[in-house]
Amino acid sequence: MRIGLSTSVIQRGHTGVAQYVFALTRSLLAHTTEHQFTLFVLEEDLPLFDFAKSAMQLVAVAEKFRPPVKNILWHQRRLPALVREHRLDVLHVPSYRRLLWRRPCALVATIHDLAPFHVRGKYDWMRMFYGRVFARELARRQDEIIAISRNTAQDIETHFHIPPERLTVIPNGLDHERFYPGSHTAARQSVAKRFGLQQPFMLYVARLEHPGKNHLCLLTAFERFKAQTQLPWQLVLAGSDWRGAEAIHAAIRQSPFASDILRLGFVPEQDLPALYRAAEVFVYPSLYEGFGLPPLEAMACGCPVVSSARGSLGEVLGDAALIINPRNSSDLALQLIRLATDTGLREQMRAAGLKQAKQFHWQRTAAATLSVYFRAIARAHASRPGERAGGKTELTATHRPGPVSRQASGTRVGAKLSRSLRLTAHDR
């Protein structure tokens, strides 16, 4: 099977979608003796895929196509021809923001969340409009869609009106070779040297985005925590600036505990495990998530978690986190105080988190994704026999897709899409 993967939505490796693409690609390396993989990568992102270049073909995409609008147009106008040139059987686009209208081969999409339908003001109005209207029409053109949680699959059915037989729920995995429990003392020493973190701290790993990531509620809760406990604990925010970040920076400047609120900016993935192991508590008050990898990574490293249950978070974290109402800073402060003052509770949540994290593996995600590729090819051949892929893949007994958990339970828009691209000026 000849498989293509578009990677230009990774935003230089700084987003959750980037971590999905990197982890999936690493796990698919185990299948390169059976299948051929072609990755379409923006030129300056090529070093990020050095781990794959000996086993997969990397096709460079000119940097002039990095800006969001130009990148969308590249997907619509240039990528179909490249798919045919490389005789691909299936193309996987891991974001609803870049889905193809043309169908040069079987098409697979991963949809991580439909946040524009849930969080008012999460994006600028142009991107909200694109995500709610045009992405829906593009999604209907895909042969198979992967949802990373049952919650996201339900949203896709409800808002995009995709029939359940074309949806497959494949949860994200965890890299257990990187995220595992280790010495808390050694981790504290490591982050003290690397980031200057000398005091006990609670950690939030998320881009600085307002209102979606809900930092202002966390800041209010932290101020109550400090006033009531008088503990030397600090709040560490790991994440790059994004839409609405100035509101967060302003709130920190005005806080009476500003000296105990530390902003690390974007933290490279190799530094995250030590931060998780060194933290006393990991807090995740997000207003909406399609999956929520950071709290799961924290659990795998043995860090107790306090989290919202919005979106898929309750589904992913189960009973292994202390659940809070993300709109109630008093509730959040109370749970932080409980964990800070009750070592028995911290140990209980640590053990529960380790057990929960063991359920997630990228190797399982990759194997299930390969099954979706086969199914997409079969659907494309059956539904549009006149539109042949660049190469023909026979579904032999050896390569026939196996069972994958499914969620239980167009109109031509080319001209409208072209007009919308002129409006979509910002991207994640």
Image (spheres, rainbow, N blue to C red):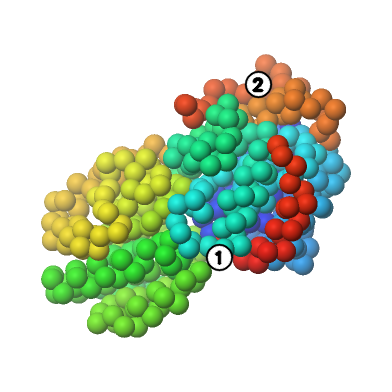
Question: Residue drawn 25% across and 79% down?
Answer: 257
Residue 302 in the image: state x and y as whole percent. 30, 51
The quadrant in which residue 378 appears is top right
The numbered disc on residue 197 is: none
- Nearer to me, 258 or 412: 412
- Which quadrant, please, contains the N terminus? top right
- Nearer to me, 182 or 208: 208
Residue 355 in the image: state x and y as whole percent. 31, 40
Question: Residue drawn 72% across and 21% down?
Answer: 395
Residue 225 visible in rendering: yes
Residue where numbered disc 1 is placed: 124
Label 2, secondary structure: give it: loop
Crowdedness near tag 2: few (<14), some (14–19) or many (≥20) residues, C-alpha within 10 Å: some
Label 1, secondary structure: give it: loop
Horizontally, residue 225 falls left or right of residue 269, namely left
Query: Marks 2 and 1, how far apart in space?
Result: 43 Å
Horizontally, residue 85 falls left or right of residue 26, namely right
Horizontally, residue 298 falls left or right of residue 384, namely left
The numbered disc on residue 400 is: 2
- Nearer to me, 350 or 89: 89
Give the answer, above or below, for where 388 lies relative to 224: above
Residue 164 in the image: state x and y as whole percent. 55, 29
Give the answer, above or below, for where 225 lies relative to 302: below
Give, as a three-letter code, the residue at label 1: Asp
- Which quadrant, please, contains the C terminus? bottom right
Please tell me how many numbered marks the rendered image carries.
Answer: 2
Instruction: Kindly report which numbered mark, 2 or 1, lies closer to the viewer in this rendering.
Output: 1
Residue 182 in the image: state x and y as whole percent. 33, 54
- In this view, which residue lies farthest toward the top? 397
